[in-house]
Image: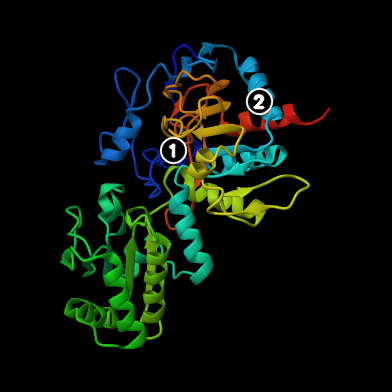
Amino acid sequence: MHDSPTLTTSNAQAAAPNAWTCPFCPLLCDDITLAPGADQRLAAPHTDCPRLAGSLARFGPNDANRKPTIDGQITDPEAALSRAASILSGAHRPLFGGLATDVAGARALYELAAQCGAILDHLHGDTLADSNRALQDRGSFFTTLSEVRSRADLIVVFACEPSRRYPRFFERIAGVGRDVSVVFVGCDIDPAANMRAESILPNADPFDTLALWSALVEGGRSIPAAELVALTERVGLAKYTAFVYEPATLPTQHAALAIEALQRIVKAINRTARAGTLALTGDDGAASVNQAITWLSGFPLRTRVAYGLPLDHDAHRYRTETLLQRDEIDALVWVSSFAPEPLPASLDDDVPAIILAHPATTVPARRGPTVFIPVATPGIDCGGHLFRVDTSVVAPLAAARDYALPTLAAIAARLAQARRPS
C-alpha cells in the first residue's frame, strides 16, 4: 500500500479533463470536477449535490492503511482470504447480501456464489423485487433521461419528491428552449423543480388515486376527481408525457401493485398518445447487479445459484430479512463498496460473516467468526461500470485517486480459486 496516496487522472478524464462520473447515485452525473483538499480528501466544489458531498466525506487519507481483520484482530490479506475461504467451504447455505458493487463485482460474485450454492440479494432487494414483479406481470413502458430532456413537454411526478434522494434530477431532465410543465400527483411540489409546476391531490391515498385514474383511462368511466380528468386531457394533448415515480417511496405493502397500476395507466394512454415511465431506483449498484445476475442466470436477484443444481428464484422466500429471521443461512457474505453499510440488525451473532466493504466500515464485535476485508470503491479507487437509472446506458467509471485497495472482483476471484478442488 502507498504511504502517500495521490489523486490520479483516468483515461476518461484524459479525453475530457474536467469530467468525472459520480458512482453514488444512479443518475451517474458525468460533468463533475474533483479537486483534492489540503488533507488529501476528495471534493467537488463546483457541483451542488449534497448526496455527492456526503459520499465523498466518507473517504479519507487513512483508507489506504485500513487492514483486514479476523474476529476484530488486524491481520494480513492472505490470512483474511484463507479464513474467508474456509468459512465458505464449510457453509451449506450462504447468503450473499448487500451486493453494493458494480458490474465486474457482480460477475465475479456470481461465480463464487455458484460454487457455494449461495442465495443472492441486494441491500435494496425489496424495491428491486417490487419492480421486477411488476415488470414480469405487466411489462413496462420505459423512457430515458435523454428522451425526457429532449421530448417531454409534460412530466407527471407520482407520489414522490425526486430531489430528496436524487438532488440533480430536475437539472438532468431540463430541456433547453422548450416549454415543459410538471404536475405532481399525490404529493407536494418538489422545491427543486425548475419548471412550471403544480400539485394535485397532494394528500390522497396513492391506491385510491390510481384506482380512480385507471377507471378513467381504461374504462372511460366518470370519476369524482376533476383534477385527474383535467390532467388526463392534458396528457392526451401533450406531445410526450413522462411519468416519474420512485418505487422506494410507494407504500411498503403492495408497492408492486401500485407500480402495476401506474404501468396500466400509461399503457392505456399509449393507445392514443405517447407516454413512458421513469422509475427512480437502482441505488448502490442495484440496477447493475440485478442486470448482471439476470444475464448470467436468467433470473433476477433473490435467486439461489449452484453449479450442477437447478436455479431457484423466489422473491419472498429469499428476502434477506426473511432468511435471517428464520435462521435459514449458515454464513453471510456482506458486500458494501460504496458506503460503510452496517450488517443487518437481524443477523444472528453466531452466524459466520465475511464483510467485503468500504474501508471506513465499522466492524462490530461478534461471537461468530467475522472476517473483514476493505475493498476499492468503483469510481473512487478503481474503474468500473454501472447502469444508469433508466438502464439504457452503462457508464464507465474512472478512479479518482491512487489508493492500493483490492477490487471486489479480485477478492471474489481469489476466493473462488481457493475453493476450487486442486
Residue 45 location, quadrant: top left
Residue at 71% x, 28% y: name it: 89
Q: Which residue lies furthest to the front in this view?
A: 326
Q: Are marks 2 and 1 in contact (CB under 8 Å)?
A: no
User: Would you name the residue on which mark 1 appears?
Assistant: 13
Q: Which amino acid does label 2 sit on?
A: Ile
Q: Is residue 57 visible?
A: yes
User: Would you name the residue on which mark 2 appears?
Assistant: 87
Residue at 56% x, 50% y: name it: 317
Residue at 24% x, 68% y: name it: 178
Coordinates of residue 100 in the picture (x, y in percent)? 49, 39
Q: What residue type is labelled 1?
A: Gln
Coordinates of residue 323 in the picture (x, y in percent)? 54, 42
Circle 1 Cα neighbour tier, 10 Å, few/some/many (<14 / 14–19 / ≥20):
some
Q: Nearer the viewer, residue 253 or 126?
A: 253
| On-image quarter of the C terminus | top right
Residue at 42% x, 69% y: name it: 260
Residue 340 location, quadrant: top left
User: Helix, strand or loop at disc 1?
Assistant: helix
Q: Which of 234 and 418 is in front in this view?
A: 418
Coordinates of residue 398 in the picture (x, y in percent)? 48, 37
Q: Residue furthest right?
A: 422
